[in-house]
Image (cartoon, rainbow, N blue to C red):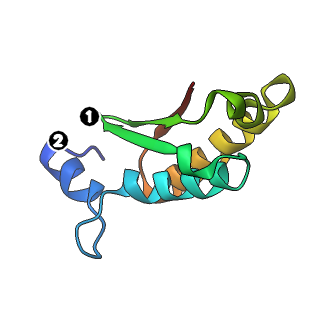
Amino acid sequence: MSLDLNERADDALDQDGGEMLSDRIADLVEYLVVNIVDDADAVSLEVIDGEASSTIEVNVADDDVAKVIGRHGRTIKAIRTLARALAARLGTSVEVEVMG
């Protein structure tokens, strides 16, 4: 069963107030990142919605980039895993990128 683009766009909207599903995933990512970094005020997210998936760009202070990435990339990998799990549950897909 495949959905055409109009049905996919309708499905991307949440039933509660028309919030995009990618915004719900971004809320999770923001919550995780804010609790990891020292400068929570410097955290900002940009959500870029595409046809098949969304990209969440996370901007943090330069001093906090290493904390978000973690040793050997373990922290960002865990954040991506949680974001992708929520996205799969909501029927969409997402990528998370860390910007300095």
Classify the position of the C terminus by image quarter.
Answer: top right
Query: In the displayed structure, would residue 42 be above or below residue 76?
Result: below
Label 1 – label 2 distance at C-alpha: 8 Å
Q: Could you say which is closer to the camera, residue 54 or residue 70?
A: 70
Question: Closer to the camera: disc 1 or disc 2?
Answer: 1
Q: Earlier in the sequence, mark 1 or mark 2?
A: 2
Query: What residue appears at the point 48 percent right and 54 percent down from the top-left corner?
Result: 25
For numbered disc 2, what is the local secondary structure?
helix
- Name the quadrant containing residue 42: top right
Q: Could you say which is closer to the camera, residue 66 or residue 26?
A: 66
- Is 21 left or right of 6, judged from the image as shown? right
How many numbered discs sit on the rendered protein?
A: 2
For numbered disc 1, what is the local secondary structure?
loop
Q: Amino acid at mark 1?
A: Glu
Q: Amino acid at mark 2?
A: Leu
- What numbered label is drawn on residue 5? 2
Query: In the displayed structure, would residue 18 be above or below residue 7?
Result: below
Which class describes the residues within 10 Å of circle 2: few (<14), some (14-19), or many (20+)? few
Question: Circle 1 is placed at which residue position?
Answer: 51
Which residue is outermost to the right? 71
Query: In the displayed structure, would residue 84 be above or below residue 91?
Result: above
- Is 48 left or right of 18, judged from the image as shown? right
Picture coordinates of residue 87, whole percent (x, y): 50, 51
Q: Could you say which is closer to the camera, residue 10 or residue 44?
A: 44
- Name the quadrant containing residue 2: top left
Picture coordinates of residue 44, whole percent (x, y): 47, 44
Picture coordinates of residue 98, whole percent (x, y): 57, 29
Q: Are marks 1 and 2 in contact (CB under 8 Å)?
A: yes
